[in-house]
Image (cartoon, rainbow, N blue to C red):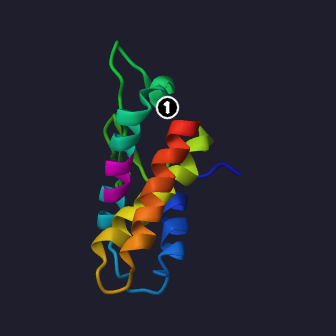
């Protein structure tokens, strides 16, 4: 089964223990964090986006919760557009970034562990 960006957000919510509605973190907040993760991935590993290379430009997609997304935007229900090797690292980025800002329910060490996992995994791929 092909995974989507929405699956990534859902799996991140499970690890954040944010599965009961109303969610602690809005979909918009989760997507903004995912988009920052994609930008960071593009900074560290631009080759992750070679399949999206168009007109001599490296396009890092922006994920939105909107069926009327305009390129280089993708609706979050879109199938994951880059190599699946980056699915889990991006999920750890989302979790780590959100944990780092969630002072009520987290330990700072856990957030840093997730962010370091993102970086070391992406560099090692």
Regarding residue 18, the answer to whether it shows in the image is yes
Quarter of the picture containing the C terminus is top right
The magenta region covers 33-37
Q: Position of residue 40 (x, y in %)?
A: 35, 42
The count of marks equals: 1
Q: Residue at x 36, y 74 (%)?
A: 108
- Relative to residue 105, is residue 73 depicted above or below? above
Query: With 39 as the anchor, is 90 left or right in this view?
Result: right
Q: Which quadrant would residue 27 be assigned to in this image?
A: bottom left
Residue at the far right: name it. 1
Q: Which quadrant would residue 95 be assigned to in this image?
A: bottom left
**Secondary structure state at the residue bearing disc 1:** helix
Q: Residue at x 42, y 28 (%)?
A: 46
Residue 35 lies in the magenta stretch: yes
Q: Position of residue 84 (x, y in %)?
A: 61, 43
Q: Nearer the viewer, residue 124 or 70?
A: 124
Query: With 102 as the anchor, is 81 left or right in this view?
Result: right
Residue 72 lies in the magenta stretch: no
Regarding residue 82, the answer to whether it shows in the image is no
Residue at the far front: name it. 109
Q: Position of residue 119 (x, y in %)?
A: 46, 47
Q: Position of residue 12 (x, y in %)?
A: 50, 67
Crowd around label 1: few <14 · some 14–19 · many ≥20 (10 Å): many
User: Overall secondary structure of the magenta stretch?
Assistant: helix
- Relative to residue 15, is residue 47 depicted above or below? above
Q: Residue at x 61, y 42 (%)?
A: 85
Query: With 91 as the anchor, is 72 left or right in this view?
Result: left
Q: Residue at x 51, y 54 (%)?
A: 117
Q: Which residue is mark 1?
A: 48
């Amino acid at each position: 089964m092909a995974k989507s960006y929405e699956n990534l957000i859902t799996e991140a919510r499970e690890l954040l223990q944010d599965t009961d509605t109303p969610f602690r973190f809005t979909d918009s907040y989760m997507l903004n964090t995912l988009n920052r993760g994609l930008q960071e991935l593009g900074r560290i590993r631009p080759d992750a986006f070679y399949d999206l290379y168009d007109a001599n430009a490296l396009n890092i997609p922006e994920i939105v919760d909107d069926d009327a997304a305009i390129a280089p935007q993708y609706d979050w229900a879109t199938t994951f557009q880059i190599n699946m090797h980056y699915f889990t690292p991006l999920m750890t980025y989302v979790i780590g970034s959100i944990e780092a800002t969630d002072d009520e329910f987290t330990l700072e060490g856990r957030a840093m562990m997730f962010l370091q996992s993102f970086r070391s995994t992406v560099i090692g791929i």
